[in-house]
Amino acid sequence: MNAGGEVVLDLQKVSLSFGGVKALTEISFDVREREIRAIIGPNGAGKSSMLNVINGVYRPQQGEIVLRGQRFTRMTPYKAARAGMSRTFQNIALFRGMSVLDNIMAGRNLRIASNLFQQAIWWGPARREELAHRERVEQIIDFLEIQHVRKTPVGRLPYGLQKRVDLGRALAMEPSILLLDEPMAGMNVEEKQDMCRFILDVNDQLGTTIVLIEHDMGVVMDISDRVVVLDYGRKIGDGIPDDVRANPEVISAYLGATH
């Protein structure tokens, strides 16, 4: 368990509304260094909205995000990326006509120092820089065990491998905090087992802090250090997996007894 580290991300009384619809109501929780922090809840609970607030896609009407001691009332995706945060999406958003290698290479964009002209002539420092980035991408390809499809257009790959490429592109940023939005959605049992293994390796071997949305409760309880539970935009549970699993309000929300 990695839940004993210092707090690196702290959400404080975050509220988000779309017109008259309240998506999140005064949600507070923290994420600690090198832990796997899961966000769970029934459909419509506000999980993806919460992830979108964390990396600046949505701007909450109330509340603050404290990232490594720096307070943000208006986070943006650019600020989040610059601060070492990357993410995958529930719906795969890869470049389907590009190869696996080039899709993952696109994740290096923020780390490329040379300008467009230098890249175009591909000489001197720009050439050396691109070769270094490609070497890093090849390491990610090896890490995710997708060497055999490295030059294959992503659109030709089965769904499970596309999700793995999506993870690879997020890892290409070398994030300190990785946001995963339902990384195992639509996968079969074998694909889920592989993805669980890679997520645990990213956390353990790369030391990456992970915030995870996932519907498969077996997966969540097996790999998470702590779990926060949302229901209709409210927080109804927060703690280690065993405590959350035994929480009567969480049980009621999942069984539908309160609805």
Image: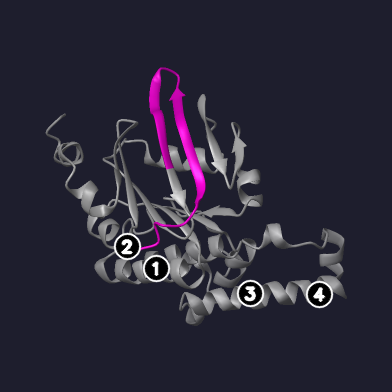
User: Sequence-wise, which precedes: disc 4 or disc 2?
Assistant: 4
Residue type of the residue flagged with mark 1: Leu
Residue type of the residue flagged with mark 3: Arg
User: For the residues carrying marks 4 and 1, which lies nearer the camera in this image?
Assistant: 1
User: Sequence-wise, which precedes: disc 1 or disc 2?
Assistant: 1
Q: Which of 239 and 21 is in front in this view?
A: 239
Q: Residues within 10 Å of mark 2 (few under 14, many from 20)?
A: some
Residue with the mark numbered 3: 136
Task: Assess whether mark 4 and mark 3 are in contact (beta carbons under 8 angstroms).
Answer: no
Callout 2 secondary element: helix
Disc number placed over residue 223 in the picture, else none: 2
User: On the picture, is 228 further left or further right than 104?
Assistant: left
Q: Is residue 50 magenta?
A: no
Real-space CA distance between mark 4 and mark 1, rounded to the nearest whole angstrom: 34 Å
Tell me: residue 53, above or below residue 223: above
User: For the residues carrying marks 4 and 2, which lies nearer the camera in this image?
Assistant: 2
Task: Assess whether mark 2 and mark 1 are in contact (beta carbons under 8 angstroms).
Answer: yes
Residue type of the residue flagged with mark 4: Arg
User: Sequence-wise, which precedes: disc 2 or disc 3?
Assistant: 3
Give the color scheme: rainbow, by chain, secondary structure or one colour. Answer: one colour
Quadrant of res 13: top left
Q: Nearer the viewer, residue 258 or 118?
A: 258
Residue with the mark numbered 1: 200
Task: Assess whether mark 1 and mark 4 are in contact (beta carbons under 8 angstroms).
Answer: no
User: For the residues carrying marks 2 and 3, which lies nearer the camera in this image?
Assistant: 2
User: On the picture, is 124 further left or further right than 255?
Assistant: right
Callout 3 secondary element: helix
